[in-house]
Amino acid sequence: MNIINIPQHVTVSLNSNKINLTGPLGTEYLKLQSGYEIILKENQLEIVINKKSKKSLALLTTLSSLIKKAITGVSLGYRKHLQLVGVGFKGNVEKEPKQLVLRVGLSHPVNILIPEDIDVECPKPTTILIKGCNLQKVNHFAAQIRDFKKPEPYKGKGILYRNEEIRLKEGKKG
């Protein structure tokens, strides 16, 4: 048995094997595996195991963690900051079609379509801010952007996460 508190501005609805969480920033759906029952009491969710086995006990904390992250996502949201480091490295967001345009030292600009449930902003030309209510989707989109120009270890140029430090290697001498 596991109990999760629900904030006041988040509404929860239960179907047979689905949890719908709605908050000010969006809606998240979670599918339940068989063997679990969720009971909604006032401002709390209670997860009960129907069939006690090692696997269901092991997945209980995973399920409660996923529900907590979904509640955080629809109420507060998740953010990921990226920095473009290099001469002439820039990024901007185009409205039609909704895409991110990167100039990262390649012979052509890179256009990346932005998924519908993710918001992307460029407060500065060298900063990208990714926001969304699903942590996995936000992190996945940030990793896709970073794959276009990973930080290189000799000059430290590339697309970095905020506060990430690249240990620079020493070049050849001679």
Image (cartoon, helix red, strand yellow):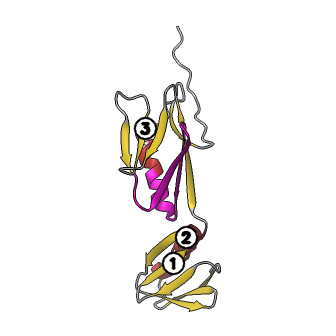
Q: Which residue is mark 3?
A: 102
Does 61 appear above or below 1? above
- Report, in whole angstroms, how far the alpha carbon at label 1 lies from the one at label 2: 7 Å
Please name the amino acid that badge 1 sits on: Leu
Q: Is residue 15 left or right of residue 168?
A: left
Identity of the residue drawn at 63% across and 42% down: 163
The front one of 147 and 130 is 130
Dot 3 falls on a residue whose secondary structure is strand
Q: Position of residue 90 (x, y in %)?
A: 49, 34
The crowding category of the residue bearing disc 2, from other C-alpha atoms within 10 Å (few below 14, some 14 to 19, many at least 20), is many
Task: Kindly indicate whether the residue at mark 2 contacts the one at mark 1 (C-beta within 8 angstroms).
Answer: yes
Residue 28, percent from left and from top: 47, 73
Residue range of the region highlighted in magenta in the rendering: 114-141
Residue 21 in view here: yes
Which residue position is annotated with label 2? 74
Q: Please name the residue shown 41% across and 81% down the image.
A: 33
